[in-house]
């Protein structure tokens, strides 16, 4: 009986320790630690691009790996992440990789409240923080519009569509003011509900292959523009 209690206590302590470690790595700094350290140093003539984002960016590599193949493009999307998490890991997952361009796609999980309530200004401040860090390190900035969402399947009833429209206006205005490139996925993918068109997402949020196929030429054009300006 005593041995059983000792075993249970040890197990609970071990689980608590693991949970504590995960909680401490709130921005998931460990996810790309090994990949970043093994990434080759940028060559002088290499047009490296880092894609910073959430599950939409991460899922792009899973759904359409051929889009990233044979290109000096680095995918640093982490599912579920919000802009404060991205801001914390921005130095190690973007700046330290020394790209010429960063493509930032963020904001929807903030509106969904994944890491707590966030005002649009809070979201925008974090996006500005990432853009300012990139600019200070001579990295060209592409800020993507947040994709349209009619409803979040994991948190229904938030009515995010209007907030996304307002956030995108803020992002676009900031890009005009600062000389960054605004990448408008929203206009190409929105339906009459201000959500994603059905063929572009089966869950209202995450693009299908057809959805990514719409996004790809748009981001390619934005990258080409960033590299020539």
Image: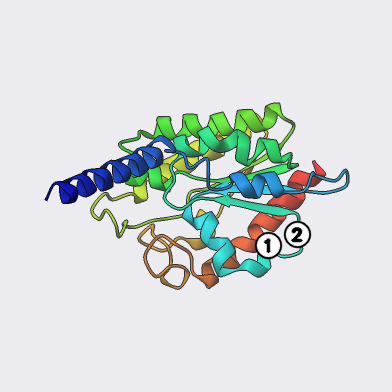
- Circle 2 is placed at which residue position? 71
Up-down relation of residue 1 to residue 170 (above or below): below
- Report if residue 113 is visible in the image: no
Classify mark 2: helix, strand or loop: loop
- Gap between marks 1 and 2 measured at Cα: 6 Å
Q: Is residue 161 left or right of residue 66?
A: left
Residue at horizontal 76%, vertical 64%? 70
Numbered circles on residues, count:
2
Image location (x, y in percent) of residue 6: 20, 45
Scheme of image coloration: rainbow
Task: Name the residue located 21 percent from the left edge and 43 percent from the top edge.
Answer: 9
Residue 9 sits above or below residue 79 on the image: above
Do the CB atoms of the residues marked 1 and 2 lie less than 8 Å apart?
yes
Question: 94 left or right of 129?
Answer: right
Label 1 SS: helix
Residue at mark 1: 68
Q: Position of residue 115 (x, y in %)?
A: 35, 40
Asked whether residue 124 is in view, the answer is: yes
């Amino acid at each position: 009986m005593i041995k059983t209690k000792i075993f249970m206590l040890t197990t609970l302590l071990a689980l608590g320790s693991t949970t504590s470690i995960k909680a401490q790595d709130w921005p998931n700094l460990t996810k790309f630690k090994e990949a970043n350290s093994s990434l080759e140093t940028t060559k002088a003539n290499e047009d490296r691009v880092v894609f910073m984002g959430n599950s939409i960016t991460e899922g792009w590599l899973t759904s359409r790996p051929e889009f990233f193949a044979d290109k000096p493009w680095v995918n640093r999307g982490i599912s579920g992440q919000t802009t404060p998490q991205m801001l914390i890991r921005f130095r190690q997952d973007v700046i330290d990789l020394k790209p010429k361009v960063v493509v930032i796609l963020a904001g929807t999980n903030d509106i969904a409240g994944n890491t707590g309530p966030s005002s649009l200004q809070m979201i925008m401040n974090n996006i500005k923080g990432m853009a300012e860090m990139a600019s200070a390190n001579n990295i060209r900035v592409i800020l993507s519009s947040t994709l349209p969402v009619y409803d979040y399947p994991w948190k229904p009833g938030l009515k995010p569509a209007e907030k996304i429209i307002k956030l995108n206006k803020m992002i676009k205005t900031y890009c005009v003011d600062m000389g960054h490139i605004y990448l408008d996925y929203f206009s190409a993918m929105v339906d009459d509900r201000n959500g994603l068109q059905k063929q572009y997402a089966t869950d209202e949020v995450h693009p299908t292959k057809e959805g990514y196929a719409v996004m790809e030429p748009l981001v390619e054009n934005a990258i080409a523009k960033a590299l020539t300006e």
